[in-house]
Amino acid sequence: MTIIERINNGISRLPTLPTVFSAISDALADPRVTNDEIAKIISGDQASAFKVLKVANSAFYGFRSRIDTISQAIMILGFNEIRNIVLALSIINLFSKEKKLLNFRPVDFWAHSIGVGIITRAIGKETGLTNLESYFISGILHDIGKLFFYIYASNEYAEVLRLVEEQNLSLSKAELQVFGVDHCMVGSAVAEKWRLSPNIVHAIKYHQLGPITGKYEKLVSTVHIADVFAKMIELGHSGDDVIYEPNLKAWDILNLPDDVFYKLSKIIMADYEKTVSLLLSE
């Protein structure tokens, strides 16, 4: 079996997302669904309900009054944002955070990914973008292809990591040498397998190249810039130390002020520490 065949086989064998997320997605397909119906689904999974409330009450969302019920969280954050919180929790909990492959540690990988999610949403909010529901989750999942390689092709991924260390390559370049595809391509295939929304799929696929023309260009541009900044300030560890040059077209599309990260850095760091603790705790 070739490496590509093994990758395709691994994608076909991916675990399905937990029942609570699937049930929410199915329910939201009905335009007449109510807050109480969604709240009942989430509340049926005590672990999910507990964490959703913790995240909703975190400084990341910045609400002054306490959110005490799932129904209240849905009313304030909206159906899709609640679904995305459950999605993030579901995917993070699907994979072990304890194992290590050379210098690749899943807990550090997720810390980087959460950092990108926080920065992505912070940039979107700062630049006045509306409909930020997919920004946090797109940042969290942008590198999911790396985790796929780590789980389903660990021997070959060890070779990728050795190339990264010995030749100072980016993970993408080393992945292309070993697999013929990189984590961006594989990650988008994983997202499609899980039937995630097209905007999330595009953010995963193009986050390193930068903006693509079309309705997803602002989201892709934001994840692209957020990934670069997260690496610059060393939030977690994405698997390599190479900071790729940002695509300046992304900066232009978002019309970012020169001092945007100076303005946001304290907020980002405060949100980062608390959100990592919330999402990565057992």
Image: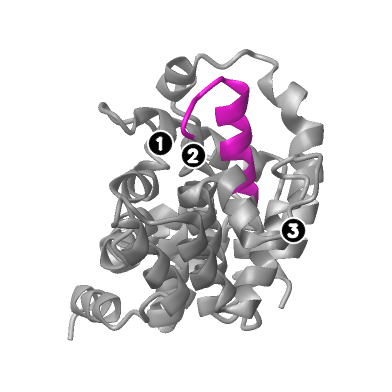
Give whichever of 265, 32 is nearer the camera: 32
User: Exactly how many numbered labels are in the figure?
Assistant: 3
The amino acid type of the residue labelled 3 equals Asp
What is the number of the mark on residue 68?
Answer: 3
Q: Do the residues bearing badges 2 and 3 touch, measured as CB atoms within 8 Å?
A: no
What is the number of the mark on residue 93?
Answer: none
The amino acid type of the residue labelled 1 equals Val
- From the top left corner, tell me how far across and down residue 29 is, in percent: 29, 57
Give whichever of 183, 18 is nearer the camera: 18
The answer to whether 164 is drawn above or below residue 103 in the figure is above
Q: CA distance from mark 2 to mark 3?
A: 31 Å
- The disc, 1 or 3, on the residue closer to the chain's N-terminal end is 3
For mark 3, give the secondary structure: loop
Residue found 74% across the figure and 58% down from its top: 68
Q: Residues within 10 Å of mark 1 (few under 14, many from 20)?
A: many
Q: CA distance from mark 1 to mark 2?
A: 5 Å
| Quarter of the view holding residue 214 | top left
Q: Magenta: predominant secondary structure element?
A: helix
Query: Quick check: 169 left or right of 197?
Result: right
- From the top left corner, tell me how far across and down residue 269 is, in percent: 78, 42
Q: Is residue 37 magenta?
A: no
For mark 1, give the secondary structure: helix
- The disc, 2 or 3, on the residue closer to the chain's N-terminal end is 3
Q: Nearer the viewer, mark 2 or mark 3?
A: 3
Q: Do the residues bearing badges 1 and 2 touch, measured as CB atoms within 8 Å?
A: yes
The amino acid type of the residue labelled 2 equals Val
Residue found 64% across the figure and 52% down from its top: 72
Image quadrant where one finds the N terminus: bottom left
The residue identified by callout 2 is 223
Q: CA distance from mark 1 to mark 3?
A: 34 Å
The residue identified by callout 1 is 220
The magenta segment? 115-131
